[in-house]
Image: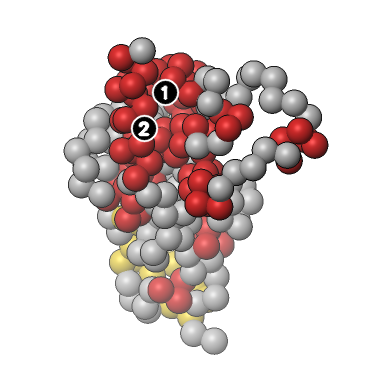
């Protein structure tokens, strides 16, 4: 079993109005089999024993499902592993003596609450603006009788895998939320049950996205690369098409 000594440079900020700064911590005996969040747990235990304030960071399921664990590790959202959330990143990626820089997601629409924790409630408000089906689509047996082509079903399912972590926003030079919004619009708009509200949905959700202060998409593709679920840029093209049709109607 390999253990490591690491130098951690971590963003510390008491609250959203405070002046933040990077602080450096030395951590010894890090097990290569630890997850990244378990390593931070060990650091926090050390800080608490020393009478210091532990590092605040978001986490919940620790299984790559909930999307709450987002942070920027050495300049990359969720860290260096491809299509992996922070909680599923393991310390075997790092070497003894490494320096690791850990920062919160940075976007005007994601204000820092404390340390590595940001307020992502802007995503919730976008969903509330239209990311649902409110028309009567019948009961479960009725829905099961609706035939959906395999390709369409797979596209809708792929879009629905978005966990709303915000990595697309954090990695975009414009802090755009279009990959997230387009995924939520696509997985409903592709299915028959989502058709009655399709045009109004795209208008409402894009309006709320703009109201929250997210930037625009310039098609650099960084969002798709850093997305832990591999949400495709095709969804953005589909959303833009629906948006233009909705405006014409």
Residue at point 52% right, 20% down?
197
Above or below 225: residue 57: above
Looking at the image, residue 122 sits to the left or right of residue 41; the answer is left
Q: Report helix, strand or loop for mark 2.
A: helix
Q: Position of residue 174 (x, y in %)?
A: 23, 35
Above or below 60: residue 8: below
Label 2 belongs to which residue? 239
Residue at point 53% right, 58% down?
87
Q: Quadrant of residue 94?
A: bottom left
Q: Position of residue 188 (x, y in %)?
A: 53, 33
Label 1 belongs to which residue? 202
Q: How many marks?
A: 2
Q: Report helix, strand or loop for mark 1.
A: helix
Which numbered disc flags the more N-terminal residue, 2 or 1?
1
Is residue 2 visible to the viewer in this orientation of the structure?
Answer: yes
Q: Are marks 2 and 1 in contact (CB under 8 Å)?
A: yes
Q: Position of residue 218 (x, y in %)?
A: 19, 38
Above or below 221: residue 164: above
> Badge 1: few (under 14), some or many (20 or more) residues near its Cα, within 10 Å?
many
CA gap, disc 2 and disc 1: 7 Å
Residue at point 75% right, 26% down?
138
């Amino acid at each position: 079993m390999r253990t490591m000594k690491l130098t951690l440079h971590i963003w510390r900020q008491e609250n959203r109005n405070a002046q933040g700064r990077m602080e450096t911590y030395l951590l010894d005996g890090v097990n290569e089999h630890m997850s990244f969040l378990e390593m931070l747990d060990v650091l926090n235990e050390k800080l608490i024993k020393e009478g210091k304030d532990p590092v605040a960071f978001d986490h919940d399921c620790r299984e790559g499902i909930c999307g709450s664990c987002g942070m920027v590790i050495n300049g990359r959202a969720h860290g260096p592993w491809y299509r992996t959330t922070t909680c599923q990143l393991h310390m075997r990626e790092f070497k003894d003596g490494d320096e690791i820089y850990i920062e919160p997601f940075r976007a005007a629409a994601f204000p820092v609450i404390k340390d590595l924790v940001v307020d992502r409630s802007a995503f919730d408000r976008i969903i509330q603006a239209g990311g649902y089906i409110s028309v009567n689509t019948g009961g479960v047996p009725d829905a099961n009788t609706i035939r959906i082509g395999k390709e369409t079903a797979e596209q809708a399912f792929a879009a629905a895998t978005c966990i709303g972590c915000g990595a697309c926003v954090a990695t975009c030079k414009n802090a755009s939320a279009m990959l997230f919004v387009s995924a939520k619009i696509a997985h409903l708009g592709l299915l028959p049950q989502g058709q009655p509200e399709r045009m109004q949905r795209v208008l409402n959700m894009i309006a709320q996205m703009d109201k929250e202060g997210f930037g625009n998409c310039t098609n650099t593709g960084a969002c798709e690369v850093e997305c832990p679920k591999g949400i495709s840029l095709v969804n953005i093209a589909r959303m833009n098409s629906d948006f233009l049709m909705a405006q014409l109607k």
